Amino acid sequence: MAIYKIKTLNNISDKGLDLFDDDFIFGPDIEEPDAILVRSAKMHDYNFSKNTRMVARAGSGTNNIPIEKCSELGIIVCNSPGANANAVKEEVLFALLLGTRKFLEAMAWVKNTKSDEIEKEVEAGKKAFVGSELRGKKLGVIGLGAVGQLVAEMGVSLGMDVYGYDPFITLRGALRLDTNVTYLEKLEDLMKICDFITIHVPYNEGTKNIINKELLDLAKPQMTLINLARGGLVDLEALKEKLEKDQINKYICDFPSRETLAMKNTINIPHLGASSPESEENSASMAVRQMMDYLKNGNIKNSVNYPASDMGICKSIHRITVAHKNIPNMLGQITNIIAEEEINISNLINNHRNGWAYTMIDIDSEVKESLRHKLNAIDGVTRVRLIK
């Protein structure tokens, strides 16, 4: 029976680690690991073992992982989308209140009050901190994944008029969207009408500075912008100009930088979106389950580099998995080699995503190790596994 070695690069919730069965050993000192569990550790200079087949992120963002390098090595990178969704949703509620009610300013004023007649001073001074209610305001949600959908539903429950936009929305995501949320096809339209805009998309080359000068020029006067997703999604130079001119009410972010700390009307939260025990437990549990399923059965779920692929529990004599580039005649070459070995294929799936592909093949006969070497020799193949 195979024993899989798992290296942990951060402290991982025990609730997740407890899911590993007796086929797994894990810890920070594991050498030549089959897979790596990580939270926030920077891996761009990491020297991967030839045995490493997966990196599982106990969280949603994967900026700390060298995705392209992993793809070239045939290493599956997966994350845990939605595991921290409720925690982030609650932080959005906090941000919405900070954006419309002057709670922070008022509490700071009270703390510095020296008067012996504090009750009278509070009653006289509180008018300086009047704010408006959320009910009836327009909320724009950019990104309608697990977090964005919860935020949109929360906005509806608060009595807000909610508008959604998602450049990557899927049919399944659209069907799950609350019917009280108005979906907009253009981000420009959302910018023009919303009092609050909150961002919930991943950071990549396609979303870098998704909120740019052109969009900020269209923003409704005194709009409040909330970014609890990732740094890099907002053009800070353009935003700074709008804040200086009081054209934007506030910027509330969960990713402080020297730039944001120096910006007017900006509230910097120290990356607390997923900082709850429940969130860390959910993320670790999701990452561990995905890792076990991949190592034992070859199934891929929530990968950010290779396509989702699932053939269930491996019940055949062998399951062959091939990670490869999505290039012409790849599937033909794979099946021809198997046919030359006089092996019958009982089941097969082939999926692709963004230039990479994954083929899973179940066979009901024994195979030689030489088959794996022949498949590995195909130009464009990055990793072949024989799963018993």
Image (spheres, rainbow, N blue to C red):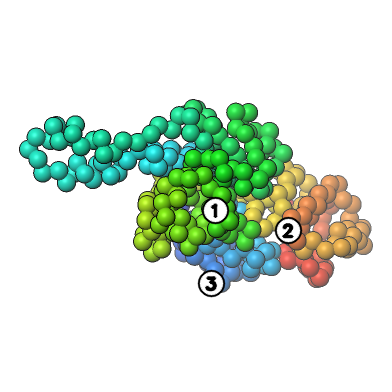
The one of 133 and 369 positioned closer to us in this rendering: 133
Name the residue beneath numbered marker 2.
354
Query: Residue 147: image x %, image y %?
Result: 54, 41
Residue type at numbered disc 2: Asn
The one of 216 and 345 positioned closer to us in this rendering: 216
In the picture as drawn, the residue positioned furthest to the left comes out as 116
Nearest-to-viewer mark from 2 and 3 = 2
Q: Taking the image as drawn, is residue 130 in sight?
A: yes
The secondary structure type at the circle numbered 1 is: helix
Name the residue beneath numbered marker 3.
45
Q: Taking the image as drawn, is residue 77 in sight?
A: no
Q: Residues within 10 Å of mark 1 (few under 14, many from 20)?
A: some
Mark 1 or mark 3, earlier in chain:
3
Query: Residue 212: image x %, image y %?
Result: 56, 57
Residue 35 lies, with reference to residue 345, above or below; the image says: below
The secondary structure type at the circle numbered 3 is: loop
Judge left or right: residue 163 versus residue 305.
Answer: left
Query: Residue 105: image x %, image y %?
Result: 28, 44
Query: Spatial distance from mark 2 to mark 3, Cα to Cα?
Result: 24 Å
Name the residue beneath numbered marker 1.
217
Nearest-to-viewer mark from 1 and 3 = 1
Q: Residues within 10 Å of mark 3 (few under 14, many from 20)?
A: few
Residue type at numbered disc 1: Asp
Judge left or right: residue 106 versus residue 80.
Answer: left
